[in-house]
Amino acid sequence: MTRSVKKRLGLMLCLIVMVFTVSGCGHKGRSNNDTIKIGVCVYDQYDTFLTQLINSFDAEVENDVLVEYVYASQNQSTQNDQVQSMIEKGVDVLCVNLVDRTAPTTIIDLARKNDVPIIFFNRELVEEDLMQWSKLYYVGADAYESGTLQGEIAAKECKKNMDKIDANGDGVIQYVVLEGEAGHQDSIVRTEYSVNTMIEKGVSVEKVGYAIANWNRSQAQTKMAQLIEKNGNEIELVLANNDDMALGAVDAYGAAGYPAERRPAIFGIDGTDIGLNAVADGTILGTVYNDKEGQAKAMYGIAVALAKGESVDGFGLTDGKYIRLPYTIVDSSNVDEFLK
Ligand code: BGC
């Protein structure tokens, strides 16, 4: 083989490797020796809030950082395999949104064995698990705060418009709850704290039903349709653990032919684009902003620092481990500030 043929073959091989690395694996950015590699593992690809959180994360990514995103279709053993393969590919740091927040041990063991730090996010593992190794962190928000703020906003609306919301005029608000996944920290805590806050604020309430709709709009529509069928006009207020399920409730009332003035007061949590628009047009009365931009920024900053072997002290981690971004109430009075 002549020298020039060898050179051309070498160049071709180099190009093939580059194409595989940059586009074939869904990586973002360029690959060279200084490149930081971050692996991001998400529990499901069809979750509205997480899609927006990941978009915010992606917007942070700089040129010398390569990020690979994988989605586990709600299967923990798929996610374990994805983590293993990311580690084999040589990621410097992992961001993991667990499928089952009670089963992180396989992932933690893999990461520790290979000295790859992990930032868990959104689906909070128990403290004992986070303490299993020094290079484990959590970025999210305080579930108690979201429930409390949803209760505050619902209580405020009830006091302001009791005549309208208390449709049967009995002085008691008949309500239903649409819950997220069973076992998720946000479902359990939001459900309890929103109702308790309404009661603390002096609203008399009566629970007429609840349904688990797994954060999902169409499941919420189906479950809400069943609740309407069973309770008819009795339902005066709907507390949904997230905006997608609040909108599922709106869909159910639409499909059942209820005009806007005969629907209950509906409240969500998240402030996703679609949730904010629903507050702006009055379809739902309020939501609680779950600061995905702040969470994405914190995750990205910590990930890069860890990948470079730098200290994360400057990020204000609680107990050296946790970042929890604050929630904010959103209603018709301030929704414009949140809409881009
Ligand atoms: C969000 C939900 C989302 C869930 C996924 C919650 O914090 O409010 O919208 O589906 O996280 O884990």
Image: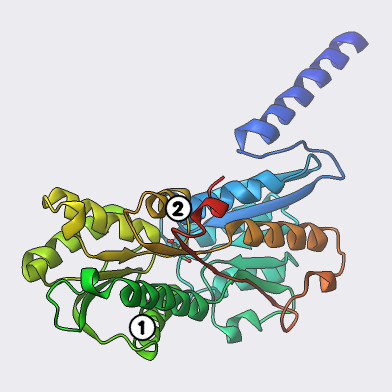
The amino acid at mark 2 is Leu
Residue 295 disc label:
none
Category of crowding for the residue at label 1, using alpha-carbon neighbours closer than 10 angstroms: few (below 14), some (14–19), many (at least 20)? many
Residue 198 disc label:
1
Secondary structure beneath label 1: helix
Looking at the picture, does residue 226 appear above or below residue 257? Answer: below
Is the C-beta separation of discs 2 and 1 under 8 Å? no
Could you tell me if residue 211 is visible in this image?
A: no
Question: Which residue is located at x 66 percent, y 40 percent?
Answer: 27
* 230 relative position to 60: left or right: left
Secondary structure beneath label 2: helix
Which residue has dot 2 on it?
276
* 267 relative position to 3: left or right: left
* 265 relative position to 52: left or right: left
Indicate the quadrant where residue 25 lies: top right
* 169 relative position to 161: left or right: left
Check the picture and name the quadrant holding the C terminus. top right
The amino acid at mark 1 is Met
